[in-house]
Amino acid sequence: MRGELSVVRVVYHSTKGAYTNAYGIIPRALNCACILVFRILNKLESFHRLSVKRRVQVSRRRSNSRKKTTSQQKGKRSAPRYSSFTESEKSEYDRTTNLITDLRRDEATYSKLRQKHHLSSPTARKNAGRDLIGGTNGKPVRASKSDRRVRNLMFPTSSGDVPISTRSSRDATKLSEFFHDRDNLLRGRLSAVDFESRWRGVHVAGQELFSDVIAILDMADADVLNLENLYASTTEDR
């Protein structure tokens, strides 16, 4: 484009000189035509430069995007699904989850909780990942404020307690508190009024907790609640 413009300019100036020498003046029509050609070529050159600049910018953006995506894929490994674990791996995972829960509640030191849940330090670190913080430069190991670990729990409904899976540690804590209060209700340690005032209308994981005291007492008498299995699944979260 630049070469073509230069040639036209040379021709124009040469022609201009020839007409000036021969006639003393450039014909008006020829002068206007040359000016029009120059303007068109200048616009084409500007458009060409802008087009090249835009292509370079788009190419750089795509390159940066690919580099960013590649670095993210390298730096972040996808965690395996809980459902794909073997029974032994699920046992280790669940015990690590219980360790994190107990550590978050300051029930004991990290070393004592590892002994309680039968976990070595490498195994606990491997299964916990970023949910265990510290442990270097003399700092104690502590649990993260919350996590997204899989927990298999029971959920109270009008037909009894049904199993659910949740990744919200806050939901798991709320369910544990509910079952703890319900246990105290059934043992006569908590009044019906206090229980219902605390849990009536409370939702966990988008569902309302069943807190009808009369129905709960009836289900307990009919052995619908299956209390032994229920407490086994929730006492570790307390």
Image (cartoon, grey):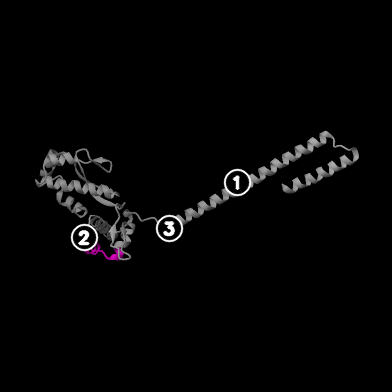
Name which quarter of the figure residue 9 lies in.
Answer: top right
Q: Which residue is mark 1?
A: 54
Q: Is residue 198 magenta?
A: no
Mark 2 or 1, nearer chain start: 1
| Disc 3, SS | helix
Given the image, on which type of amino acid does mark 3 rest? Gly
The residue pinned by badge 3 equals 75
Residue 194, disc: none
How far, Cα to Cα, is label 2 from label 1? 62 Å
Q: Name the residue at 72% across, 39% down.
A: 40
Q: Residues within 10 Å of mark 2 (few under 14, many from 20)?
A: some
Amino acid type, label 2: Ala
- Which quadrant of the figure has residue 50? top right
Can residue 211 be seen in this snapshot? Answer: no
Q: CA distance from mark 2 to mark 3?
A: 33 Å
Q: Assess whether residue 109 is covered by the magenta stretch.
A: yes
- In this figure, which residue is indicated by the disc labeled 2? 108
Query: Which tag is nearer the camera, tag 2 or tag 3?
Result: 2
Residue at the limit of the structure toward the right, as seen here: 22
Label 2 element class: loop
First to last magenta residue range: 107-123
Number of marks in picture: 3
Residue visible at 18% across and 47% down in the picture:
179
Among numbered discs 1 and 3, the one appearing first in the sequence? 1
Point 74% across, 49% down: residue: 3
Q: Is residue 183 left or right of residue 80?
A: left
Residue type, numbered disc 1: Arg
- Indicate the position of residue 105 as horizontal and vertical percent values: 23, 55
Using the image as rendered, state which of residue 223 and residue 42 is in the foreground: 42
> Which residue in the rendered view is the most extreme toward the left?
188
Residue 22 in the figure: left or right of residue 148: right
